[in-house]
Image: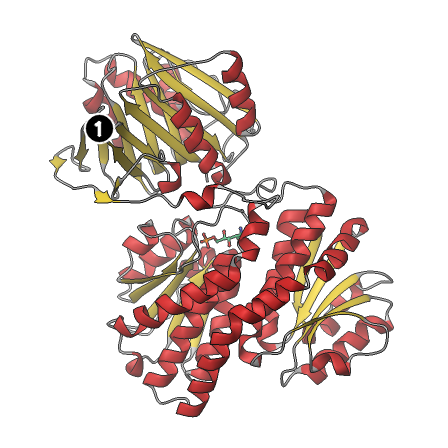
Amino acid sequence: MCGIVGSINHYDIVPDLLEGLGNIEYRGYDSAGIAVLNNNELTTIKRSGKLRNLAQELSLKPLSSHAGIGHTRWATHGKPNETNAHPHSNHDVSVVHNGIIENYLDLRNWLTAEGFRFQSDTDTEVIPHLISLFLEQGLPPQEALNIALKHLDGAFAIGVLFRRDAEHLYAARRGSPLVLGQSDLGLCLGSDTMALTSSVDRVLYLEEGEQARLSRDHFCIIDANGQPIKREMKLFSHQIDSQSKQSHQFYMHKEIHQQADTIRETFYHTQRQVPELPINFKQLDRISIVACGTSYYAAMVAKYWFEQIAKVPVDIDVASEFRYRDPLLSPHGLSIFISQSGETADTLAALRYAKNQGQKILSIVNVAGSTIARESHFSLQTQAGPEVGVASTKAFTAQLAVLAKLALHTGHSRNAMSFSDASHLMQEISTLPGLINMTLGVEDQFKTIGESLKACSNAFFIGRGISYPLALEGALKLKEISYLHAEGFGAGELKHGPIALIEPGVPVFVLAPSDSLLEKTLSNLEEVMARGGRCIVLADQRSCRHLPENVESITLPDCDSRLTPILYAIAVQLIAYHAALAIGTDVDQPRNLAKSVTVE
Ligand code: AGP
């Protein structure tokens, strides 16, 4: 959940550290700090709150150096205050860390007994003191680090500076991502490629258990046994565009408006990638799909598609539950893992479990080179481009685009759908970018509705069939950026309890496309209205003709009822965005959240 950066080169690295931290602040923003090395002295500056607080401090007390590390935090152990901010340093060692050290209490007790004094409540602070313990026994930095790492249980990606080694920056990873970058000016490291300085044109992803030692012009990789290994950097080009909001107030708004293009781009690429997959879709007897959060709702939609279009049974699981229910996976079956970041710890752990069970692993990720992509047998990349807003929007619809193509391809491979139906659906898919733009074109209507939620304390979303996952997604979008309590239900479930929550004025969003369940959905709408609930209907040009008088509604364009999740996603995103804007929350970096959940 945190973001780490590091840099060593021939000029002042402090601006690079701040630039890198700014680009990965979405990974966590409770506090930020840097440590730099000058004339055999380590200097650490850190501040609670957003990165701007640290930048302000550095403008008052400028620092410069050729080697440094930085960190932006999402608190796991210890309050989000200055003391618990990273880097954690002692006289000889400074460390930034992303992950969780699970045996930190035992280590803390041991190191306290060895005379070390702890300043913070974090798990991370054991790392610099543990390294120092071995330095004091006369070991050189690399060996002291290597031995210290062997004492750690849990996950880490770390950057390390040694006061007595001005020529090197050290790094190591186990369970959390870490990437190295190189340019003609020097070397750097980061939690993901967004952290790397804009001059970087070559990258290398550290593998599990590997360490790295960086100097101004060279790097060396060391395996888990401390042996140097030869690995080459790969060419890389930064997607600078993602680092600007253009004319938008928030990245989320920019990313919502990119969806016609990202959907078109994703369909185009997936069209070519899917047939190349060495998977015998004809012989598949079952598919398992696993993900978290919004990506899990994409999995829920995919279940309808694979079962209705391709006639393949699908099991779906929230990643954090999957491996603990001892799932009965079909032998040599296909397990699909969906993740925007490609680094979600719960999803990665589930993937490793399924792989150990002999499953073929296919991942759908938005970040090339991410750990989930690299640990899959096959990976499809959504073409959403870097998604900076913590609330996932364009990545979600891009995931749906890939899954729709996969379901279509599977159905076609199994002769489960007629050629005419497959052609019709392909034609409908090709119209989606235009329909998305039409939906974006009535943003003012979503703005009015979103703003009207400002005075509410609850909001509900209901839908049936393939709209049910969208009801859940709409509730998640609203709650995570506006902090309003929002909940999604299958519309048919209302009468089994949730309807007790309906009282005059409570806003209930009713997803009502003109599909085979419309009549039942309209009955549920009437049930809510009869109890004074404020129904706001998301309908299309056909279903809107069946709505009761005077009910609030927004009419979306008509499309094949199987594709409505992609279109209705735009609607619920805009409603959430404008509600949050009216309430005044930090839309891109909502409280307590981070973009990539790299801790279990
Ligand atoms: C989505 O708006 C949330 N930020 C969150 O639920 C997210 O979808 C979830 O953490 C999964 O992330 P991933 O797709 O990167 O694995």
Q: Which amino acid lies under the numbered mark 1 shown in the image of this protein?
A: Arg
The residue located at (43%, 70%) in the rendering is 403
Residue 439 placement, left or right of 395: right
Residue 68 position, x and y percent, is 35, 21
> Is residue 112 at all visible to an observer of this figure?
yes
For residue 392, above or below residue 540:
above
Residue 472 position, x and y percent, is 61, 63
Label 1 beta carbon less than 8 Å to ligand 1: no
For residue 498, above or below residue 239:
below
Residue 227 position, x and y percent, is 12, 34
The residue located at (63%, 66%) in the rendering is 439
For residue 522, above or below residue 146:
below
By what rule are the colours in the image chosen? secondary structure
Q: Residues within 10 Å of mark 1 (few under 14, many from 20)?
A: some
Residue 79 placement, left or right of 163: right
Residue 513 placement, left or right of 291: right
For residue 427, above or below residue 332:
below
Residue 243 position, x and y percent, is 47, 41
Residue that label 1 marks: 213
The residue located at (48%, 61%) in the rendering is 261
Which image quadrant is residue 160 in? top left
Q: Which sits in the foreground, 391 or 171?
A: 391
The residue located at (35%, 25%) in the rendering is 127
> Is residue 418 at all visible to an observer of this figure?
no
Q: Secondary structure at mark 1?
A: strand
Instruction: Give the total number of marks visible in the rendering.
Output: 1
